[in-house]
Image (cartoon, rainbow, N blue to C red):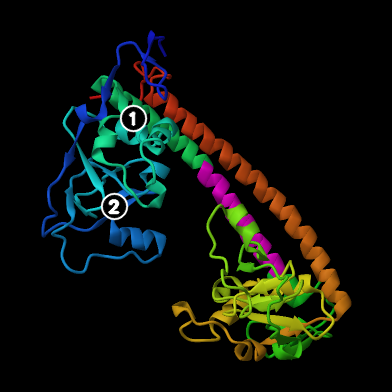
Amino acid sequence: MSTQAFSESGVPWLSKLPAHWKVLRACRIFIERREAGLDSDEQLSATQKYGVVPQKLYIQWEQQKVVLALKGIENFKHVNVDDFVISLRSFEGGIERCKYSGCVSPAYTVLQAVAEIDSRYWAYLMKSAGFIGTLQSLTDGIREGKNISYQQFGQMKVPFPPIIEQRRIADFLESELQNIDLLVAEQARAINFLVEKRSAIISHAVTKGLGAKGYHESGVPWLNRLPAHWKVLRACRVFIERREAGLDSDEQLSATQKYGVVPQKLYMQWEKQKVVLALKGIENFKHVNIDDFVISLRSFEGGIERCKYTGCVSPAYTVLQAVEKIDSRYWAYLMKSAGFIGTLQSLTDGIREGKNISYQQFGQMKVPCPPFYEQVKVADFLDSESARIDLLIAEQEKMIKILEERRSALISAAVTGKIDVRGYKGRTAA
């Protein structure tokens, strides 16, 4: 690729630009579209992952609920293909390109190009790290729900390459990013395989043991055959419900699928999010000890959580205390196994509407009960195997992070002219 001359842009986030590029205020390129939604318009969602797409498609792709307008769209805003939308989360992930015609929430700002542009180039620019960093500095309080206004956006200084270069940059990035995305997808598949392998190893070990010489029919569908010397007991024979009230000295804990039962303050720190702490004492909370187990409101999704700290948990939770000599690690693996979680899901109706699994329901479950020494052996084996697989997963995740950083750097360099693509021989720039 050829070399080119640069000049100072006078804009901190752009630094030097190709000398023949312009620097314009965004209001010279985009105006605010204020058209009302049409009766024929489909309601769209502005998403960081997919751009601006039909809400029904977004629901389908993400398998989640989105609130649709039920009383008409007269207050909604019309958008055309290749418009851009400033959403309430643009300060986090940039401004979204419209891939469909339709209408969007009146809380959003719709941008319509009045200059000749290649919308693909602008989609890349508006998702680049420097652009998003500038959005974040535009206004105070947007994290409290305020939007970035058109006036604020319009005063931004942005690069404006000749249209032929916009097209070539977009062509170049589409080609290069496709290769990176394929590599990321390959790493993601490897992670999924490792996660599935770990799940299979756990499910086999907690129900079949390690090298058992004989098996017997358990009479329990999710267990099938068990080692001949293992017992099958109702869970109430292994665990009772702990009903102790929280102590004044207890720290408030959270039952999480990712970390187990851990202090809320640690969970907030690890996940960088807010958690509602009890403000009026913990007299209604339940005391838990290390190696108790907690049935939370989401146990039907991810199993029952092991306590890694002493403290107290929400009164909505059920606390399980072992009455048998157990290795809590074995039971933690069992309670996170696919068969166990599937059985939890079948225990009660309506748990997805916020109902909990009761101790009575849990207590009637039939569970495997290996001898204590074998629980220890299985737990030791699974600790070792899980650590080995987790290390492999971490390596794949590290590679994905490197690829994503390369992706981000490539976009930033290309949209600001640091990569000269004028001689790019990809698709013909019309």
Q: Would you place residue 122 above or below residue 292 in this image?
A: above
Quadrant location of the C terminus? top left
Q: Amino acid at mark 2?
A: Val
- Residue 53 got which mark? 2
Of the two numbered discs 1 and 2 in the rendering, the one whose residue sits closer to the viewer: 2
Task: Please tell me whether residue 30 belongs to the stretch shown in magenta.
Answer: no
Q: Is residue 215 above or below residue 188?
A: below
Give the left or right position of residue 278, taking residue 425 as reference: right
Measure the C-alpha gap from mark 1 to mark 2. Answer: 21 Å
Name the spot of residue 418 as percent of width and height, x first. 43, 19
Q: Position of residue 345 (x, y in %)?
A: 54, 80
Residue for point 59% across, 87% down: 358
Q: What residue is rendered at 39% in x and 10% in y?
A: 6
Image coordinates for residue 266, horizontal then vertical, percent: 65, 57
Q: Which residue lies under the disc numbered 1?
A: 170
Residue 183 in the image, given as x and y percentages of width and height: 53, 40
Given the image, on which type of amino acid does mark 1 rest? Answer: Ala
Q: Quadrant of the N terminus?
A: top left
Magenta span: 184-202
The majority secondary structure of the magenta stretch comes to helix
Q: Quadrant of residue 214?
A: bottom right
